[in-house]
Amino acid sequence: MVAVESPLLPESASCVNCSFVNNLGNTAGAIRLKRYNSSFFCNAEIQDCRFINNTAPYGGAIFTESKSVLELSNSTFI
């Protein structure tokens, strides 16, 4: 799983031509964009990725918290 969660990391992440297969998480199966406070939000660009058989209670493939921005293109969810 890719978790963009630390306030020490850049505020954005990019995944291009990646495969996320058989991930299991407590919140998100493959990718989680987490908000830490009212001024720190995580944003992500996901392009040409494959999400296969990912499982979680809130987002089997992707979970975003409020005000996070997700740009998603040409990706497959199975």
Image (cartoon, helix red, strand yellow):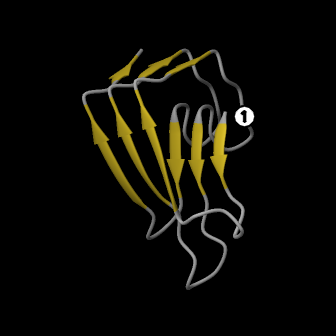
Residue density around tag 1, few if under 14, some if 14–19, many if 20 or more, within 10 Å? some
Residue 58 or residue 39, whichever sits in front: 39
Quadrant placement of the N terminus: top right
**Quarter of image, res 38:** bottom right
Q: Is residue 41 left or right of residue 6?
A: left
Measured along the vertical axis of the image, is residue 10 above or below residue 76?
A: below
Identify which residue is drawn at 58% across, 77% down.
40
The quarter of the rendered structure image containing the C terminus is top left
Coordinates of residue 22 in the picture (x, y in percent): 64, 15
Task: Write down the quadrant of residue 59 in the picture.
Answer: top right
- Label tally: 1
Residue positioned most to the left: 74
As drawn, is 66 to the left or to the right of 6?
Answer: left
Q: Residue furthest bottom?
A: 38
- In this orientation, which residue lies closer to the viewer: 45 or 53? 45
Q: Is residue 3 above or below residue 25?
A: below
Which residue is label 1 attached to? Answer: 25
Q: Secondary structure at mark 1?
A: loop
Task: Locate residue 50 relative to residue 62 in the image: left or right.
Answer: left
- The residue located at (71%, 26%) in the rendering is 24
Give, as a three-letter code, the residue at label 1. Gly
Give the image location of residue 16, x and y in percent. 40, 32
Observer-nearest of 78 and 31: 31
At 62% from the left edge and 25% from the top edge, which residue is drawn?
55
Give me the residue at 64% from left, 80% from top: 37
